[in-house]
Each structure stands twice: as structure tokens, then as C-alpha cells.
Image (cartoon, rainbow, N blue to C red):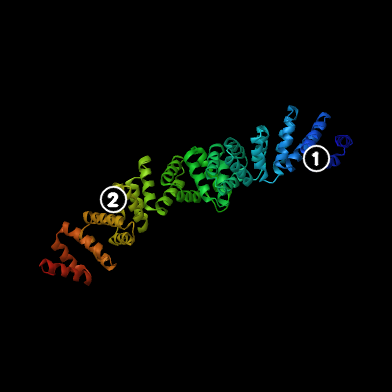
Amino acid sequence: MADLIGELLRAGLQEPAAALLQASVELHSPEGLAELARILHRRGHRDAVLVLLSATVAHRSVPEVLAVCGLLTDPSFGDALVQAVACPAQDRVCGELPELVIALHASGFGSLADALQSAMARSRVATDVAELIGALRRAGLSTAAADVFSQTQQRTTGHLVALVSALHTANLHDAASNVLSHALKMRPAAELAQLIIDLNVAGRHKDASDALTACVRSRTQADTRVLMHCLDQMHPGMDSLSLLAEAATLCSPEHAADMLIALLDGDLHEHANAIYTCTTQDRPTGHVSAALLRLHTTRPKYLTATGLAVQARASTASSVVNLSLALHTARLDTHLDAVLEAAGPQQSAGHAAVLLKNFQRLHEPSKGQSTRVAMRLLDHVVRSQPLDYQLALIGMLDRTSLNEIADQLEGRMCSIWGTRRVELSLYRCSSPARRSSSDQRSSCDGRPAGP
């Protein structure tokens, strides 16, 4: 057989020689294959040896491959075996390759196992690589799994996206997170932008948002500006502002605040405002309060009482209520008072009535807190506004069925203006319903109700 293969090769008949080598792989025993390889090697047909061994690794069973490797322990076959083991990484069924890698490790053929797993890390699809990593971990070969994981991360961002999905599917969530962490440390900003876009296109929105959040928080200001520019250019329908807003809805309040500060430091004020708007308007009260407290601690000049008052004057009543509850939860009382004053007493009585109506609409678990903040707003009204303003507000509250709040306001007014004066004023200007209520209170007090 070796003579015939040699003659075919010398005659330049490569295809018949290759067919004969393939037939040898299919028909010979492991011992016969090892002997054929030794003869071809002695006669200088090293390419034929490589073809023979590569086909053996690609097509024979795992025990037979191990047997051939065990029979060719001569150091002169070292390089040929390493190349032969790496070549069929694309040919064998994926389920057999992890078995072969693990068997090579277990049989003492560590260099051959390294060659095969490295070839897989460089060339197999992400699902196959994830399967190999999982199999190596389960076999206790954590170092080998780490090597595969490290090597496969050197590939394109498209492969990384597929790898993240495959690792999540294989319940290797820690590895999926590590893929993104490694990319954030090692990849340039333009590649990170492509990775974030690709993750979004693949439906991995949480991973994309996590990557964007971590990148903004950890990279330099120059990198962040490049990242924002690239995100604006890469994909129709996606831009840096919308992606930042999505990230702000998914990350922790502390991370949202850190992102905002990093964007401010990079002179990306529009992007910082997008984070702030999304955080304060679209997240639950507890989340908003934690973010505001972080901002107050780390960047007090950004979160000023004066600035919040300006924001409150231009905001809707529901936005003011959300912001007020968050400030109350964070115990930022000075800021809360500035917001309530700007959105309530400094506006018309109608504005204040609408604001109180929005506080009243809240249900549990925010009901108790909203009542306390509403009462704080009433205190601002009675301390800063004249009696006519307060009387007008009571009338509006009555007409919108907020009688309980109207009674609370009247009680506070009486403590400032005197009970008799308030009741007489209400009698002159209020609705019949309020007049009837006033009559009943005056009757109970033993005082006349009207002039």
C-alpha cells in the first residue's frame, strides 16, 4: 500500500493517491494505520502522512484515534499529529469533538487536546464552542475551558454576539457576561459600538444595554464620544440617544447616575439629559429616589434646588408628582420644597388644584406617601399665598370632588387667618355645597353661619 501510494505521488497523481489514503483510513485497523504512517514517514511522504492522520482523526471512533496516537509516540510524529488533530475541527460532528478533546486530555495527550480545542475555538460556530466549554467544565477541565473561552473571544464581534446567545442558551450565564466584560476592556470604541448594535439586532437588548452602560461608566471621555458618534452612524432606526434611554430603563439607579455623570464630564449634555429624563419619568419611585440621591452625593451642582424648580415649572403635573415622591423618599427636603413651591403656589390656583388631584389619584403602596407630600404642598400654599388665592383653591377642590383635601386646606387656613374670618369668606364666595358644609360647622360651633 505504501509502495502504491508512493508511485502515485511520484507520478503526480494526487487524486488517486488521496482516494487510496481515504480507503486505507476506512479499511485498516489502528495498528495498520500506524504502521502505514511510519512507512510513509520513513520514505519522506510527509504530506501523505498528514492526510492519512487527519482523515483518521476526522472519521475513526474516539478509541481508535486514541489507539493510533498511542502507537505513534516517536517524537518525529509530534508535529504531524498536532497538525492532524487540528485539521478535522470542521469535519467531525460537534458532539464527538468534545468527547475526543476530553479523551485526549485523560489519556495524557495534552498537546493534541490543546491543538484540537484551539482549532475549534478559532473556527467552529458559537454554539459548538459553547458546547465544548460546557463539556470541559463538566469534566473538571476548567483550565482547558478557560483557554477555549479566551481564544474564541479574539474573533469578530458577530461571533461574540452569537457566542453570548449560545452561552445563555447553555445556562453558562457567567461566561456570557464575561464575554462582554472582556470586550469592554480589550476592544476599541468603534468595535464596541458594532457589538452593541449587533446585540440589539439579535434581540439581546439587556446584554446590549449592559454593555453600553458599562462602557460609558468605564471608558475614557474620548472613547465615549467616539462610541456615541459610531452608534449614530451604524444602523437605521438606532441612535445613541435612544439606546442610552433604553439602557437607563434597564440598569440600576446607581449605574444610571454614574452614566449621567460620565456623559456630563465628556460634554455630552444632550445625552446626559436623555438619561436624566428617562430615569426620572419612566422608573418606579424607589429607583428614581436612589438615582437622585446618588446624583446629589456625587454631583450636587447638577442636582440643585433651583434647577429642579425650573424643571417643575415646565413639567406636567404627573411628572411633578413622580419627582416629588422620589425626592421625598430620598429625604432631599430642600429640593422637594423647591419643586412643590414652583409647581404649586408660584403658579395659579388652578395649577395647584391639578397637582393635588394627581396626588389624590395615586393608589397603594404610594397612597400614604402621596398624602404626606400633598399636605406639604398645602403648607406651602397657606404660608406663601394670600387669602383670596387660598379661597379660590378651596372652591376648585370642591368642584373636583376633593372635599377632604379642601377641608385639610381650610383647617390650615383657619390656623393662620382665624376660623371666623375664613368661614365668612368662604360663605361669601363658595359654591352651595361648600356653603352648606360651612353652615353645619358653624351650627356645631354655636356661631352664626352668615353675616
Q: Which residue is drawn at 41% across and 47% down?
A: 253
The residue that mark 1 highlights is 28
* Nearer to us: label 2 or label 1: 1
The residue that mark 2 highlights is 337
Percent position of residue 282, x then y: 42, 54
For the residue marked with disc 2, what is the amino acid?
A: Asp
| On screen, residue 143 above or below 441 | above
Task: Work out whether mark 2 precedes mark 1 in sequence or the reverse, and give the earlier one.
Answer: 1
Percent position of residue 396, x then y: 27, 65
Q: What element carries label 2?
A: helix
Q: Distance between the residues labelled 2 and 1?
A: 90 Å
| On screen, residue 84 above or below 343 | above
For the residue marked with disc 1, what is the amino acid?
A: His
Q: Which residue is drawn at 30% across and 53% down?
A: 340
Between residues 380 and 286, which one lies in front from this camera angle?
286
Percent position of residue 37, x then y: 79, 34
- In which quarter of the view is residue 373 placed? bottom left
Q: On the picture, is 349 further left or further right than 29?
A: left
Between residues 166 and 281, which one lies in front from this camera angle?
166
Q: On the picture, is 423 further left or further right than 104?
A: left
Q: Which residue is drawn at 59% across and 47% down?
A: 166
* The furthest residue to the top: 75
